[in-house]
Amino acid sequence: MVKELSVQEQKYRAVMAVLTDGRSVSEVASQWGVSRQSVHAWLRRYEDGGLAGLEPRSSRPGSCPHQMPGVVQARVLELRRTHPGWGPRRILYELGRLDPVELAGESVPSRSAIYRCLVRAGLIDPQARRRRDEHWKRWERGTPMELWQMDVVGGFLLADGRRAKALTGVDDNSRYCVSAYLTLRETSQRVCDGLGLAMRTHGVPEEILTDNGKVFTGRFNKPPVEVLFDRVCRENGITHRLTQPRSPTTTGKIERFHRTLRSEFRTDRVFEDLAHAQAELDEWVIEYNTRRPHSSIGMVPPVERFSRREEPLRAAYTPTGQDRTGEDWVARRAGSNGVISVSWQQICLGKAAAGRQVDVHVTDQVIQVWDGAQLLKTTARTSTGEVRKKRASIARDEV
């Protein structure tokens, strides 16, 4: 029966072959299939500790100067578990803001060390890392207020079962959130209410970039028309820019803001009502703008860039009344079906406008229908004939 020798016994026989039998170290190393350095090490350990010195030892280094200290590792994991959306870069930023006493005087680790710590703890899946598409081209305006990116995002569930949407906007240069306006219905009027609030709060930008949604543009209508959002931009001297169809990366900054909004504001919860949801959202926007570091602008809060704007902001346009006595204004009374006729062109205002007296602004390209200070409809002019009744603001008691 063949008896298998333990590692300690094999080392002992090799040492005895050198010390007792007088064989050379090279010969013994060749016989046992090890290096000469190993045999010399066994001889030293046998001389120092006898047979006990040949016991197997751990190959782990006695010290590792670059190993993350336990107090720092515990702090890293605590930050990650408290804020699941924080990655290594954000955790590194937060560690740098801590009092050295909280880290027991230890130095702040590198971002890669934090990443490895999170992987070891199973808090990051290394296989889930996405490679950036190389054909994307990053772009950014040079100063704040040159360009706003705006969009509408849904997903705010209220306790009564209704869902709200938000008109969102970020400044292209600073990533400062200029709009987070909740509404129950995505209508042109509500979207423009949010735009007006943003301009009264932060000023009027030079340009606004949006997608081709119907609340933003009517260029795909048949025929194309000027919607209320376009008109607000025109009256305030704003250049309204549109993305190419099916090109969401053009408005990548606002789309990235939506991702942050969903993960950090937690839009997957239920809000008590619209007012409470707006109040919570406003608080989060203050945190986002003034305290939260943004990785795309050097880990500083957006307010640090946004506050550097040099030129005075233009005031938002506020209509103070219009002179409707000119030759380009006429008056009409909607029929029982809510339709008016201007130069043999029929315009439907809806049954809600039936019997109402309205003012109509007629130009060579478009026709705008007003009910007092409210714009009811803007449509392209398709007729070139004479416009009758060139007098606006019909008296309400006139038949």
Image: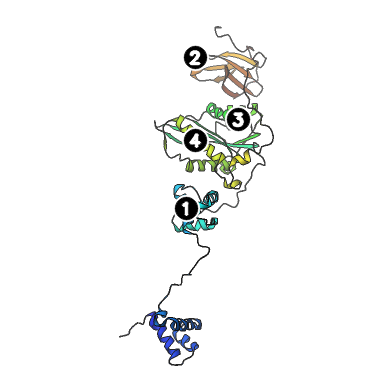
Pointer 4 or 1: first along the chain: 1
Question: For the residue labelled by badge 2, is the local secondary structure a helix, a strand or a loop?
Answer: loop
Q: CA distance from mark 2 to mark 1?
A: 71 Å
Whether tag 2 and tag 4 are in contact, CB under 8 A, the answer is no
Crowd band around label 3 with a 10 angstrom C-alpha radius: few (<14), some (14–19), many (20+) = some
Question: For the residue labelled by badge 3, is the local secondary structure a helix, a strand or a loop?
Answer: helix
- Rendered residue at 56%/22% (across/down): 377
- Rendered residue at 45%/87% (across/down): 31
Task: Give the label on residue 199, or none.
Answer: 3
The coloring applied to the image is: rainbow
Amino acid type, residue under disc 4 in the picture? Leu
- Rendered residue at 46%/33% (across/down): 277
Pointer 4 or 3: first along the chain: 3
Position of 305 with respect to 13 (left or right) is right
Name the quadrant containing residue 52: bottom left
Name the quadrant containing residue 216: top right
Q: Is residue 183 above or below residue 52?
A: above
Q: Nearer the viewer, mark 2 or mark 4?
A: 4
Position of 114 with respect to 138 (left or right) is left
